[in-house]
Amino acid sequence: MTGLVSRLRGSLTEATRFFLVSVAGLSVDVGLAWALIALVSASDPVAVAAGFATATVANYFAHQFWTFPSGPRAASLRRFLGFCAVVAVTFGVRLTALALLADVFPGSGVEAPIRLGLAAGTSFLVAFPLSRFLVFSESRT
């Protein structure tokens, strides 16, 4: 029983760290895009791509060395590419959830943040286990 409680506590800690890194990554993503648009008149697609790519790299290293401390200790190209694949799947899940929720919460008023929040939450529920068990598991090198 003690082992199960310890594993659950570890998973909760990892999920909390994953959430915090994800929020920080979103801040980097949007902040950099906004800065590029405002300061150097970058086009929206260029700014968004730069912000997204920078956040993906930063999140990979944060997850590698902080979120999943029981996993492999050295960064690797294989895990980074796996993480990029997880990010792509997560993005697809978010877009799908957003499309499905548009029928339930139509409109641009108070419905929009509800729709966006639920879609983000759904993608988080997919991203965490994929990252934990496919990219950063102890058996992966």
Image (cartoon, helix red, strand yellow):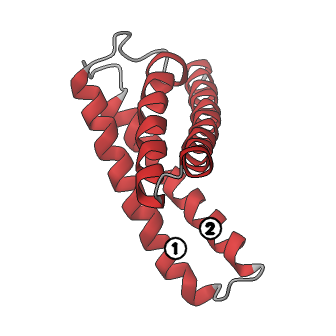
Q: In the figure, is residue 116 to the left or right of 43?
A: right
Dot 1, how many residues are within 10 Å of its Cα: few (below 14), some (14-19), or many (20+)?
A: many
Residue at (63, 88) in percent of width and height: 106
Q: Is residue 24 above or below residue 122?
A: above
- Tell me whether the residue at label 1 lies in contact with that at label 2, contact meaning CB atoms closer than 8 angstroms: yes
Q: Which residue is mark 2?
A: 116
Corner quadrant of residue 14: top right
Q: CA distance from mark 1 to mark 2?
A: 7 Å
Question: Vertically, is 86 above or below 117?
Answer: above
User: Going 24% across and 18% down the picture, which residue do you hit?
Assistant: 141
| Residue hosting label 1 | 98
Relative to the observer, which residue lies in front, 1 or 127?
127
Disc 2 marks a residue whose amino acid type is Leu
* Viewer-side residue, 9 vs 48: 48
Q: Residue at x 34, y 45 (%)?
A: 86
Rendered location of residue 51, percent (x, y)? 49, 44
Q: Secondary structure at mark 2?
A: helix
Q: Residue furthest right?
A: 110
Mark sitting on residue 52: none
Residue at image coords 38%, 43%: 130
Left or right relative to 111: residue 13:
left
Residue 106 higher or lower than 35, as above or below: below
x and y, in percent, of residue 19 in the image: 61, 39
Identify which residue, 38 or 74, lies in the foreground. 38
Residue 25: where, in percent of width, then height? 56, 38
Pointer 1 or 2: first along the chain? 1
Which amino acid type is shown beneath numbered disc 1? Leu
- Residue 1, image x and y in percent? 60, 24
Left or right of residue 58: residue 6: right
Callout count = 2
Give the residue furthest to the front: 40
